[in-house]
Image (spheres, rainbow, N blue to C red):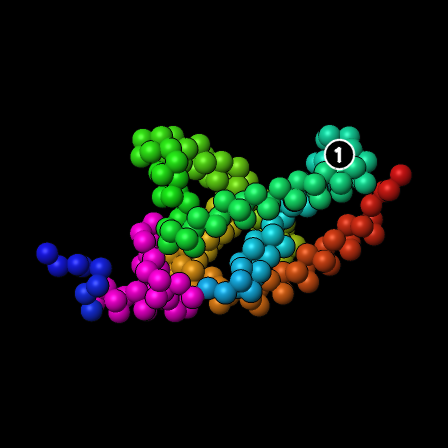
Amino acid sequence: MTDHSTTPDNIQAAVDSDRAGHIETHGVDYIPHGERHGKPRELFSLWATPSVSSYLAIISGAVLVTSFGLSIWQAVAVTVIGGLFSFATGIVAVTGPRSGTPSQVVMRAMYGVRGNRVAIAINGWFVSVCYLAIGWSAASLVGFALAERMGMAASVPVKIVVILVIAGLTILLAVYGQATIATLYGPLSIALAVVFLSVGAFVFAGADYS
C-alpha cells in the first residue's frame, strides 16, 4: 500500500501551506516532527492579538461593575484571579506538542471516541456561541458605530455588509492558517495594543471612581 501522506505532491502541499499566504492543508491530522518549528515567542503575538483586539474584554469588565455591583478594585481583583486560572489551560495544552494533534483528538484517549463526541459538542457550543458569536456581535456594533461616524446611516443593508465583512475576514484568515496568522499577528499585536491602551486611557479618564 502507498502512504499517501508522504507522496511528493502531499509533501510539497505541506511545505507550501507552512508559508504565509498559502492555504492551510493541516486540520486535526497528525503533524510530523519535521513540520513542528514554532517558537515560544510566536505564541505571544498569537495570544496577545485576540486579547487586545477583543472589545468584549472592555464590555465584560464594565459588566462586573454595572451589572454585578462590584467596586472597581473588586472587579480588578476578580479579573486578576480569573486570569490566573489560564495556567490550567497551559498545563492541559502540553498534550498538543507531545502528541502532534489538537486537544480535540487527544481527548479521545481520556473519554473514548463516543465520549469525546459529547465533550466536543459541549465545548464546540461554548466556542461557537459564547466566543465567536458574542465576539462578532461586539465587533459588528463597533462597525455600525464607525459607519455612522463616516456619515452612513446604520441601515439594515449597511449592517448586513458590516457583518459579512467581519465574518468573511475571520473565515478567510482561518483558511490561510497558522503561517499567515503568525505573520500578521506580530505587527497587529503592536498596533492593536496601542489602540487598546488609547481606548483604556479614554475610559479611565472619564470614569466615575466614586
Q: Considering depth in this image, is 46 or 39 the residue closer to the camera?
A: 39
Judge left or right: residue 25 versus residue 148: left
- Determine the image quadrant of residue 173: bottom left
Determine if the magenta segment contains residue 174: no
- In the rendering, at what x and y percent does residue 92 appear? 50, 44
Outermost residue to the right: 210
Estimate how packed mark 1 is, as few (under 14), some (14 to 19) or many (20 or more) residues with alpha carbons within 10 Å: few
In the image, the segment drawn in magenta is 9-37
Is residue 14 visible in this depiction of the protein? yes
Is residue 141 visible in this depiction of the protein? no
**Up-down: is 200 above or below 181?**
above
Inspect the image, locate mark 1, and give the three-letter code of the amino acid beneath it.
Thr
Identified at 22% across, 59% down, the residue is 5
Identified at 59% across, 46% down, the residue is 87
Q: Considering depth in this image, is 123 or 1 the residue closer to the camera?
A: 1
Determine if the magenta segment contains residue 12: yes
- Determine the image quadrant of residue 113: top left
**Up-down: is 190 above or below 153?**
below
Judge left or right: residue 106 versus residue 71: left
In terms of secondary structure, where does tag 1 sit? helix
Identified at 76% across, 40% down, the residue is 77
Q: Mark 1 points at which residue?
A: 66
- In the rendering, at what x and y percent does residue 116 appear? 36, 34
- In the rendering, at what x and y percent does residue 17 appear? 34, 65
Dividing the image into 4 quarters, which one contains the N terminus? Answer: bottom left
Dividing the image into 4 quarters, which one contains the C terminus? Answer: top right
**Up-down: is 89 above or below 192?**
above
Identified at 72% across, 38% down, the residue is 78
Outermost residue to the left: 1
